[in-house]
Image: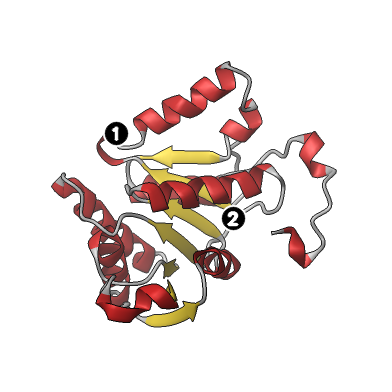
Amino acid sequence: MAGSSSHHIRNICVFGGSSLGKEKEFLELANHLGQVLTERKIHLVYEGGSLGLMGGVSIAVFLGRSQVLGVVPKALAKGDIIGKTIGEELQVSTMSDRLNAMFNHVDAFIALPGGLGTLEEIFHISSWAQLHIHDKHIGLLNVNGFYDNMLSFLDQGVEQEFLTSLARQIIIFATTAEQLIDQLQSFIPVIDPSMSRINWSSKESR
C-alpha cells in the first residue's frame, strides 16, 4: 500500500496518554515527536491539557513555535482536571464533538502509547477509514513494543476472517517519529471496492 506518491501533511492530530506511563522512553518519544513536527513545519491538534504524553508533545511543539490547538470538552476544562491547555484551546460540548473537531482540523493521525481513550480514538478513526468516510492516514508510534499485542490482535482478526487484509493495512506503524511521518506522507490507501460504493455525502453520515 505504500508508494512513491507524497501526501503533504500540514496539520496532524496526536492521540496519547494523559499519564506518563512506566517507561521513560514514552515521554522521550512524545517530546521528540513534538520536535520533529516542528522541524517539518507540521501543526499539532491534540486533546488539550498539559498532563502526561499529551503534555510532552504539545509543549515541545509550542516551544518550537509551531501552532498548537487543544480540543477540550467543557466538562474536562473545569476544575483543572487535565491541566492548562498548551497553545490555543477550542472548547466543545461532548467527547464526540471533540473527536469530530480534531478530525476536521487535520490531515493525518498519530497515536502515542495510551489507555482506553487512546484506543477508542484509534479504532474510531480507523473504522471511519474502513467505511470510506475518509482517507486520512493513521499511524502508531510503537515504542518499546507497546502496540505489539494490539497489532497481533488485528492480525488474528484477519486470520479469523473478521477483518479484511485491506482493512488491516489502514493502521501503519513505526518505532521512530521520523520513520512514521515519512510513512504517513508516502502511504497510498487501497479502498475495499465494496466500501467505495457507500455514499457519505450527507453531513449526518459521521
Q: Which amino acid does label 2 sit on?
A: His
Is disc 1 placed on a helix, strand or loop? helix
Residue 29, position as x, y percentages in the image: 25, 52
Q: In which quarter of the image is the N terminus?
A: top right
Is disc 2 placed on a helix, strand or loop? loop
Task: Say few, some or many: other residues with alpha carbon within 10 Å of mark 1 (under 14 / 14 to 19 / 20 or more).
Answer: few
1 or 2: tag closer to the N-terminus:
2
In the image, residue 29 sits, relative to residue 105, either above or below, namely above
> How far apart in space, not on screen, are marks 1 and 2 (Cα)?
27 Å
Residue 145: which numbered mark, if any? 1
Q: Tell me the quarter of the picture where residue 89 sits.
A: bottom left
Task: Classify residue 204 as left or right of residue 11.
Answer: right
Task: Say few, some or many: other residues with alpha carbon within 10 Å of mark 2 (under 14 / 14 to 19 / 20 or more).
Answer: some
Q: Quadrant of the C terminus?
A: bottom right
Residue 26, position as x, y percentages in the image: 22, 49
| Residue at figure coordinates x 28%, y 41% from the top left | 143
| Residue at figure coordinates x 74%, y 35% from the top left | 192
Q: Which amino acid does label 1 sit on?
A: Gly
Residue 97, position as x, y percentages in the image: 56, 69
Q: Nearer the viewer, residue 119 or 108?
A: 119
Q: Tell me the quarter of the picture where residue 79 sits.
A: bottom left
| Residue at figure coordinates x 40%, y 56% from the top left | 15
Residue 3 visible, this angle: yes
Farthest residue in the bottom direction? 88
Residue 200, position as x, y percentages in the image: 79, 56
Q: Nearer the viewer, residue 52 or 196?
A: 52
- Please give the residue where the numbered disc 2 appears in the rendered image: 7
Task: Classify residue 146 as left or right of residue 75.
Answer: left
In the image, residue 53 sits, relative to residue 76, either above or below, namely above
